[in-house]
Structure formats: C-alpha cells, structure tokens
Image (tube, rainbow, N blue to C red):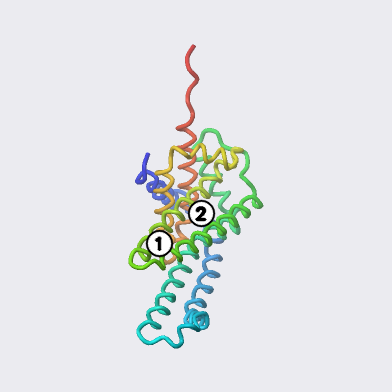
Amino acid sequence: MGFAHGAGFLFRGLRMWRQRPGLMALGLVPAVLVLVVLVGLFVALVVLADDLIEWATPFADDWSDPWQAVLRIGLYIAVVLGSLFLSAVVFTGLTLAVGDPFYEKIWKETELMLGGDVPDKGVGWLRGAIDGVGLIALGIATTVAVFVIGLVPVVGPIVGPVLGLVVAGRLLAGELVSRALEARGMDRATQKALLAGHRSTMLGFGVVVQLCFFIPFGAVAMMPAAVVGSTMLAREVLDAEVRPPAAR
C-alpha cells in the first residue's frame, strides 16, 4: 500500500453515491449547514480584513511606499489564505461534531456492506463531538504554524501551504479512520500502533480529501464519500493485521 492506494479510497467512497444515493444524501445535511456558516464568516473576514490589518499595524503609517503597501498587502493575502485553510480544517471538525448521527449511519451501512465483523454500535454523539472539537483545535494550531512559516521570505509562501496540506491531511485521515477503530474498542495509542505501518496510505487518503475540500462545494459532496472511504481503509488495515494461527 502507498500514497496512491490511499488516495484511491476516496474514489471508492464516491461510488457509494451511485449505489446508495439516499444514504449518502444524509451526509449533505450537516455539511451544508456548516458550510453556510463558514462561508458567511469568511466573506465577513474578507470585507473587514483590510481595516483590521491597518488597525493592527499603526507602526507602518509613516512608512514610505512601496513598503507600507508590501507589508499590508502581504498580511492581507496571508490572512485570507490562512482563513481559507482554517475553514477547510474547521469544516471537517464541525461537520463531524454536528452530523455525527448522520455519519454514523453511513459508517454502519458501509460496515454491513463490507461484511465480516461489524461492531454493534458506534462511538456515540458525545465522543464524536469531542473528537471534532479536538480536530478543530489541531487545525487552528496548524494554521498558525502555516501562517508563521508563510512569513519567511521567498520559501515561506511555498513551504507553508504544502506543509500545512500534509499535516492537515494526516490529521483528517486519522480522525476519519478513528470512527471504525474506536467502535472496536481501540484507544488512541492502539490506533497509532495499528496505523504505524500504513502512514503513506493514510497520507494519500487525507491529502486528496483535504484538496477536494478546497474546491467550492467540494467539501459538501466529498464528506459522505470520505466517511465511506475511511471505513474501507480501516477495514483493509484491520484485515491486514489478522493472521491465521500457526499450524501445530
């Protein structure tokens, strides 16, 4: 398994739209609600960012051109890009927290479709909400780091977003896959040990999902598919760990 193999799980999840459109449509409800809120906040930030940056940089009022413009335009771009990145990460955490009953239904039906050992119940709404809030906190920390790295001349604007995408993708994949693993009684330490040998697969899945979230309305359509794909990924990892007992 590798990066491309992991990315393929999202496309396998997308096939569920053709097989079970009614089930997948359930996942649109929380995604649309969260998207509307985040778009409203993002638009407000874009409108107000110029005034906020001018207020936050009074020391630049006496600077001569073009340095004043370079500083404030650079900060404006960094704030807008950072908020866009943060929105993509926060979207996942909020949607998982708000829509846990919907996504648990999608997860359970995917488990039944795959057959084999299927847990009787999921992790529950409270646990899902806590995990969602945790993902938001990690997303905020990642965004701050990306913003700081982005301030480094020349390399910062390139390295920052790329590093942010990799970190966010890894966090996203871990959070999505954890549903199937937690339902089987695995704590975070056990999950980490289980997934240690599948880092490139997890990264491939998380990065391609995160990239789709940057596409307008892509997050809404992709979220249900990501839940399906992560369930399939978790099952493949679990199956790979199962070994028949040695013959005596």
Residue marked by disc 2: 22
Give the percent coordinates (x, y) of residue 173. Answer: 48, 49
Observer-side mark, 2 or 1, equals 1
Check the image and report above or below for 242 versus 112. above
Q: Is residue 162 left or right of residue 226?
A: left
Check the image and report above or below for 44 versus 85. below
| Quadrant housing residue 121 | top right
Residue marked by disc 1: 160
- Give the farthest residue toward the left: 154
The one nearer the camera, 182 or 165, is 165
Q: Is residue 126 left or right of residue 150?
A: right
Q: Mark 2 to mark 1: distance in Å?
A: 39 Å
Q: What kind of element bears circle 2?
A: helix
- Give the farthest residue toward the top: 248
Q: Residue at x 52, y 41 (%)?
A: 192
Give the percent coordinates (x, y) of residue 45. Answer: 51, 76
Q: What kind of element bears circle 1?
A: helix
Q: Tag 2: residue type?
A: Gly
Give the percent coordinates (x, y) of residue 153. Answer: 36, 68
Q: Residue at x 49, y 41 (%)?
A: 234
